[in-house]
Image (cartoon, rainbow, N blue to C red):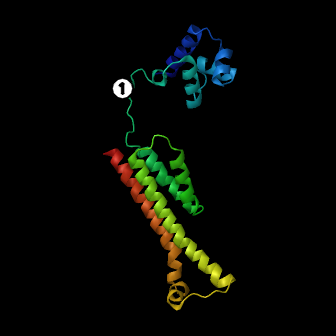
Amino acid sequence: MESQTVNQLIKQSRKLRGLTQQDLANQAGLSLRTVQRIEKGTEEISGFSLRQISQILEIPLEQLIMPNVNQISIDKNQSGSIKALYLASLTFLVNPLLGLLVPAIMGYTKQNKDAQYSKHLKKIIIIHATGLLFLGAFIGYIFAADFLKIGLPSSLNYIFTGWLFLLIPLCYYFVIIIFSAVNYFRIRGADVS
């Protein structure tokens, strides 16, 4: 549907309800200028504005967006949202805690989660929590050994004093990058085929 047709439909529906542009703006929580521009077709309609206007004019969103709703392809397996989770998990590169928090917040605030989405969210949270545990042990040892002068048992001291000690953060970053990339491209590949 062309944007002009949407604009005409909004304008006609508003007039049929006996509303002025100011009335529609007030009821929809929009500015008068926004309503004027939408009806003239000089402004793209944001999702928020479209939803507000459709509620006030009691026009289904589908009718405003497309004349043939049955032709809209719907992402039933939420692969776009799952890919976004994996991309969000890469925020650990900025701060390791963000790799856990950003996907967790996205998952918590997402509505209409299906089982597949929840499964991937759980995998992301588990791998980041495990990685943070090992990274925390790495940082905790540095703090305990250097600042508090606390020694470790000799069996653990071997691991933490040699070059193996540096593998902990390197493995953390490597494993999470590979995990996120492989799963992202696996989901993306499923979309293409």
Question: Which quadrant is home to the C terminus?
Answer: top left
Q: Which residue occupies the foreground of this view, 127 or 91?
A: 127
Question: In the picture, residue 148 is in which quadrant?
Answer: bottom right
User: Most extreme residue toward the left, as rendered?
Assistant: 193
Residue 36 placed where, x, y %? 65, 18
Residue density around tag 1, few if under 14, some if 14–19, many if 20 or more, within 10 Å: few
Total numbered labels:
1
Q: In the depicted view, which residue is nearer to us: 152 or 92? A: 152
State the residue in front, 37 or 17: 17
Residue 152 in view, yes or no: yes
The residue indicated by pointer 1 is 70
Instruction: List x then y, in percent, for residue 152.
Output: 57, 87
Whole-percent x, y for residue 164 in the image: 49, 82
128 relative position to 19: left or right: left
Q: Is residue 181 positioned above or below 150 on the image?
A: above
Vertically, is 174 above or below 29?
below
The residue located at (68%, 16%) in the rendering is 22
Q: In this view, does 113 lie to the left or right of 40?
A: left
Identify the residue at image location x=56%, y=62%: 93
Q: What residue type is labelled 1?
A: Asn
Residue at the far bottom: name it: 154
- Circle 1 sits in a helix, a strand or a loop, which is it? helix
Residue at 63% from the left image edge and 84% from the top image edge: 145
Report the residue at 54% width, 45% height from top. 109
- What is the quadrant of the N terminus in the image? top left
Work out whether residue 44 can be spotted: no
Which x, y percent locates residue 48? 58, 30
